[in-house]
Image (cartoon, rainbow, N blue to C red):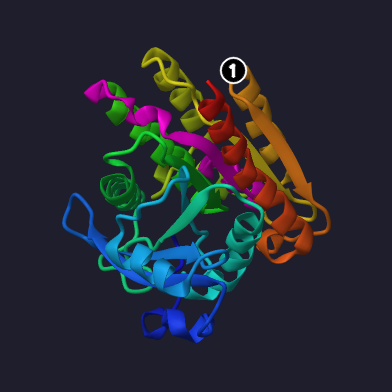
């Protein structure tokens, strides 16, 4: 993770989310396995319920409702901290809530060294951060209910974080031989790349430059292709259904070549995963979530989890 926004520690949720916003956001924290303090932004739509009920839901983190619940985890790219992303995340979350029969909560994860989280960013550390965030939500939302689904959403380098987080979650569930591996029903990869090694070639395509040959010395080695293959194998060996994969591609991505998204789609199909690839026309790398078409596409991905829940309820 090469970029930590300067001045980000002074940012607050209130700076970007106005009072009375349709989505209520609050700040929480958890501890990673190595003791690093990780900050979370937890959001819940207010639509269709009394504001005091929403406040109680977020305050207690043990909501009681008759509807199945979906917890969405958001893993960001490396270009800013979480608070500036909240207005766009709110639009997506609110769009789903407007027509949903499910209860939605969004947990956005601030990596170590980002925003108010302690520590320094590294791949091994961020993997622990993702583990801690999923464990935090499992304890508070899913420990006593089989109705709770997890959906994992990552953008750019966050897509690599998300895929690896799902792989590690399924490995732990298989080791414990419990049912938690079935909680994750959807993995959304927004503007993903196949691997850091492949991105090195994309950034430095000239064969006469030495950089593309220096991949063994990379400090971060996110490999989404490998993670998709491994999570499919792990899920099936443990008797779980692997999550469906949604790949959201920027139509005019100036950073990640188109063949990365196509390659991930092909890898997913070869691994026996349910996959769809959707393109936000005209969008640059960081614009997908900020365009109306991108909001529609991401909303449809979230509603895929709703269809899964409805299917389970009919069984």
Query: Mark 1: which secondary structure?
Result: loop
**Quarter assignment of residue 301:** top right
Q: Nearer the viewer, residue 45 or 14?
A: 45
Q: Nearer the viewer, residue 207 or 92?
A: 92
- Residue at image x 37%, y 60%? 111
Q: Is residue 274 left or right of residue 132?
A: right
Q: Nearer the viewer, residue 77 or 216?
A: 77
| Residue 111 seen in the current view | yes
Percent position of residue 143, x then y: 27, 40
Asked whether 167 falls inside the magenta stretch, the response is no
- Mark 1 Cα shell of 10 Å, populated few (<14), some (14-19), many (≥20): some
Asked whether 183 falls inside the magenta stretch, the response is yes
- Which image quadrant: the N terminus? bottom left
Among all residues in the image, which is located at the extreme right?
282
Using the image, determine if residue 274 lies above or below residue 23. above
Among all residues in the image, which is located at the extreme left?
35
- Residue at image x 38%, y 68%? 114
| Residue 206 seen in the current view | no
Using the image, determine if residue 79 lies above or below residue 147. below
What are the residue bounds of the magenta stretch? 175-203
Q: Is residue 266 left or right of residue 65?
A: right
Location of mark 1 (residue):
272
Percent position of residue 42, x then y: 41, 64
In this rendering, the count of numbered labels is: 1
- Residue at image x 66%, y 61%? 289
Percent position of residue 11, x then y: 42, 83
Percent position of residue 60, x then y: 28, 63
């Amino acid at each position: 993770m090469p970029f930590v926004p300067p001045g980000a520690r002074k940012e607050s949720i209130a700076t970007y989310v106005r009072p009375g916003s349709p989505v209520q956001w609050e700040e929480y924290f958890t501890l990673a396995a190595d003791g690093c303090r990780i900050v979370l932004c937890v959001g819940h739509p207010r639509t269709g319920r009394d504001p005091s009920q929403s406040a109680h839901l977020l305050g207690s983190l043990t909501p009681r409702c008759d509807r199945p619940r979906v917890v969405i985890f958001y893993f960001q790219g490396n270009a800013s901290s979480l608070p500036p992303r909240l207005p766009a995340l709110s639009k997506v979350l609110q769009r789903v809530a407007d027509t949903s029969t499910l209860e939605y909560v969004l947990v956005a994860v601030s990596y170590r060294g980002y925003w108010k989280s302690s520590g320094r960013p590294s791949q091994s550390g961020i993997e622990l951060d993702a583990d801690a965030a999923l464990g935090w939500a499992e304890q508070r939302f899913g420990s006593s209910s089989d109705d709770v689904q997890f959906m994992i959403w990552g953008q750019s380098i966050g897509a690599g974080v998300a895929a690896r987080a799902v792989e590690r979650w399924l490995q732990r569930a298989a080791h414990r031989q419990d049912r938690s591996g079935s909680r994750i029903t959807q993995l959304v990869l927004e503007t993903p790349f196949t691997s850091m090694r492949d991105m090195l070639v994309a950034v430095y395509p000239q064969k006469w430059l030495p950089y593309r040959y220096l991949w063994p010395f990379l400090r971060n080695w996110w490999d989404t292709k490998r993670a998709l293959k491994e999570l499919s194998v792990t899920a099936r060996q443990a008797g779980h259904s692997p999550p469906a994969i949604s790949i959201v591609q920027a139509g005019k991505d100036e950073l990640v070549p188109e063949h990365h998204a196509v390659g991930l789609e092909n890898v997913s199909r070869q691994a026996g995963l349910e996959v769809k690839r959707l393109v936000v026309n005209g969008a640059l790398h960081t614009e997908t979530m900020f365009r109306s078409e991108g909001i529609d596409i991401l909303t449809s991905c979230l509603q895929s989890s709703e269809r899964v829940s409805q299917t389970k309820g009919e069984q």
